[in-house]
C-alpha cells in the first residue's frame, strides 16, 4: 500500500514500518554507563526515556512551560542511539563531534518519512540549535533527573559508586524545580511509595 502525502510526494508504508522497527531498537539498547559500575543488566534506553518523559511533563508544568512540547522532546531525544548506541561519558570524551554525528544520524533517519512528519520530528530533535528554549532545557533536566533517580535506586541496591553519577548529574540541572526534586530524590527510599500504599486501610 502506498500513502499519498502533500503535493506529489508519495511514500511506501514500508518506510514507516521500518522506522517503527528502528525505534524499537531502543528497547534493546542498554544504558552503557552503568556497566562501568559492574551492573550486568542495566535498564534499556527506552526504559530510561519512559520515566524521563513523565518527569519532563511535570517539570514543565512546575516551571510554567509547554508541558506537551517538553514531554515530546524528552520522548524523542534518544532516537540517534538506535544507530550509534548509548555512549557513556568516558566514551564521549573521545568523540568531541558527537552532537554533529547525532544531527547527521537524525537527518538520515527522518529522510524516508513524509515531509510533514519529518518536519514535526525535526522540531523536537533539532534542539541543539535553539538549546535555550525553556522546553529543551526542561527536557534535558528531565534526562538528568532520571539519571539521578536511577542512581538512587542503584545506591539503595548496594552500588555505592552510583552516588558519583547522581552528584555529577545534579551539577547539570538548570531549573529550580529539577534541583529541588533532585535533593528530594537523594533523601528518598525507592520503595517508600509502595510501603505507604500498603498502610492504606480499605
Image (cartoon, helix red, strand yellow):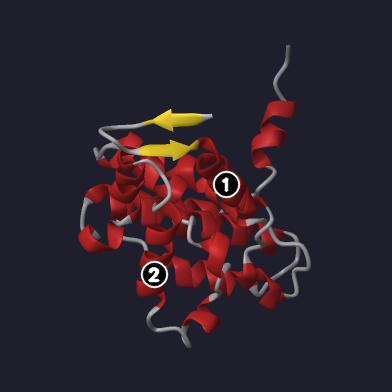
The mark total stands at 2
Q: Is residue 6 left or right of residue 101?
A: left
Look at the picture and state if 122 lies above or below 88.
above
Look at the picture and state if 80 lies above or below 9.
below
- Residue situated in front as seen by the camera: 183 or 86: 86
- Residue situated in front as seen by the camera: 107 or 187: 107
Q: Which residue is mark 2?
A: 171
Residue at 42%, 60% (x, y): give it.
Answer: 108
Residue at 65%, 60% (x, y): give it.
Answer: 29
Q: Of marks 2 and 1, which one's residue comes earlier in the chain?
A: 1
Q: Secondary structure at mark 2?
A: loop
Residue at 30%, 57% (x, y): give it.
Answer: 126
Q: Is residue 10 left or right of residue 147?
A: left
Residue 34: % across, % down: 66, 69
Label 2 vs label 1: CA separation? 38 Å
Residue 55: % across, % down: 45, 44
Q: Which residue is mark 1?
A: 18
Residue 105: % across, % down: 43, 64
Amino acid at each position: 500500500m502506498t500513502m499519498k502525502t502533500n503535493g506529489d510526494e508519495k511514500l511506501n508504508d514500508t518506510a514507516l514500518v521500518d522506522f517503527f522497527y528502528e525505534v524499537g531498537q531502543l528497547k534493546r539498547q542498554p544504558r552503557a554507563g552503568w556497566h562501568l559500575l559492574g551492573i550486568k543488566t542495566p535498564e534499556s534506553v527506552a526504559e530510561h526515556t519512559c520515566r524521563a518523559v513523565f518527569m519532563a511533563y511535570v517539570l514543565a508544568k512546575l516551571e510554567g512551560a509547554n508541558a506537551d512540547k517538553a514531554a515530546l522532546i524528552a520522548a524523542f531525544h534518544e532516537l540517534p542511539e538506535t544507530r550509534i548506541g548509548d555512549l557513556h561519558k568516558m566514551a564521549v570524551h573521545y568523540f568531541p563531534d558527537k552532537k554533529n554525528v547525532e544531527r547527521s544520524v537524525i537527518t538520515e533517519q527522518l529522510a524516508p518519512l513524509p515531509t510533514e512528519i519529518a518536519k514535526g520530528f525535526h522540531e523536537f530533535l533539532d534542539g541543539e540549535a535553539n538549546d535555550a528554549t525553556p522546553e529543551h532545557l526542561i527536557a534535558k533536566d528531565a534526562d538528568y533527573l532520571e539519571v539521578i533517580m536511577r542512581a538512587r535506586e542503584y545506591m539503595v541496591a548496594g552500588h555505592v559508586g552510583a552516588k558519583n553519577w547522581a552528584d555529577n548529574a545534579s551539577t547539570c540541572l538548570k531549573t529550580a524545580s529539577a534541583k529541588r526534586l533532585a535533593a528530594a530524590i537523594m533523601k528518598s527510599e525507592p520503595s517508600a511509595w509502595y510501603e505507604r500504599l500498603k498502610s492504606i486501610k480499605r
